[in-house]
Amino acid sequence: MVAPPLLKLPDEAAYRAHFESVYCRGPVITFDGIRVRIRKRDFDHCCFKTERGTRRKTIFCRIRAERIDWIKAALEDPAADLRVGWDNLRKQYAHDRRVAIVFGTYVVVIEIQRCGTKAELITTYVADSGPGNTLNKLKKAPKWRQKRT
C-alpha cells in the first residue's frame, strides 16, 4: 500500500479539527475486523512529542500531524508488519498491544480489549531507524497473532 499524501494544514487547530472529524465520529475498522475507538484526547499522543528531560508531550510536531491520515491507512493495511507491543511498566511484551509498522517507519499502536474485537488507539509516530533505535527494537518483537475467541 502506498502512503497517503502528507496533510498540509495551517496550524494545530486545523489539524485537531481534521483529526476529530475523521476519527472521533465512530470506530475505524482494521483489515481483520477489530473496531478501534479513537478519542479526541488521542490527538495529543498522535501529534505532540515529549520535551527533552520530561515525560509530558508538550511540543506540537508537524511531522506527526502531517501523517494523521496515515493512521486509518495503517489500521486498514493487511500488509502491515504486525508486532506484539511492549509494556514499559512491566518490562515485558504485552499481547494485548498490537504495533503496526507501515510505510517504512510509521508506527500505530492499539490496545486490544478482552473480547478481541475492539481496541483503543494508544499512539502513533514515525520511528527512528538505524542500528539500536526504535524501529530495530520494534522489529525484534514477536509477530502479533490474533487470538481466536
Image: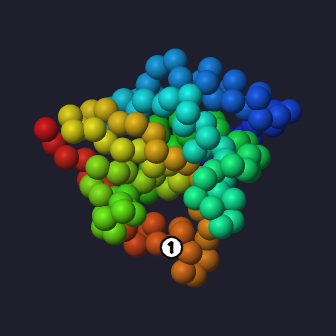
Quarter of the rendering containing residue 4: top right
User: To which quarter of the image does residue 9 belong?
Assistant: top right
Q: Is residue 22 above or below residue 12?
A: above
Residue 96 in the image, given as x and y percentages of width and height: 29, 49
State left or right for residue 118 relative to residue 71.
Answer: left
Identified at 69% across, 65% down, the residue is 52
By what rule are the colours in the image chosen? rainbow
Answer with the quarter of the image where residue 117 lies. Answer: top left
Q: Is residue 1 visible?
A: no
Closest to the observer, 114 or 4: 114
Q: Which residue is drawn at the image coordinates 42% and 54% (left, top)?
A: 99
For mark 1, does the 10 Å Cα neighbourhood hold few (<14), some (14 to 19), or many (20 or more) residues? some
Q: Could you say where residue 28 lies in the image, as x and y percent from the top left?
A: 45, 28
Q: Which x, y percent locates residue 101?
A: 50, 55
Report x, y in % for residue 103.
59, 54
Q: Element at badge 1?
A: helix
How many marks the image carries: the answer is 1
Spot the residue most to the left: 149
Out of 40 and 5, give the one closest to the viewer.
40
Horizontal side of residue 100 vs 95, given as left or right: right
Residue 36, placed above or below residue 46: above
Reading the image, the residue beneath label 1 is 136
Amino acid bearing label 1: Asn
Q: Is residue 51 visible?
A: yes
Residue 111 left/right relative to 28: left
Q: Dividing the image into 4 quarters, which one contains the C terminus?
A: top left
Instruction: Decide which of 34, 60 is in the foreground and name it.
Output: 60
Residue lying farthest to the right in this orientation: 10
Residue at the image position 40 percent from the left and 37 percent from the top: 120
Give the residue drawn at x 40%, y 72%.
140
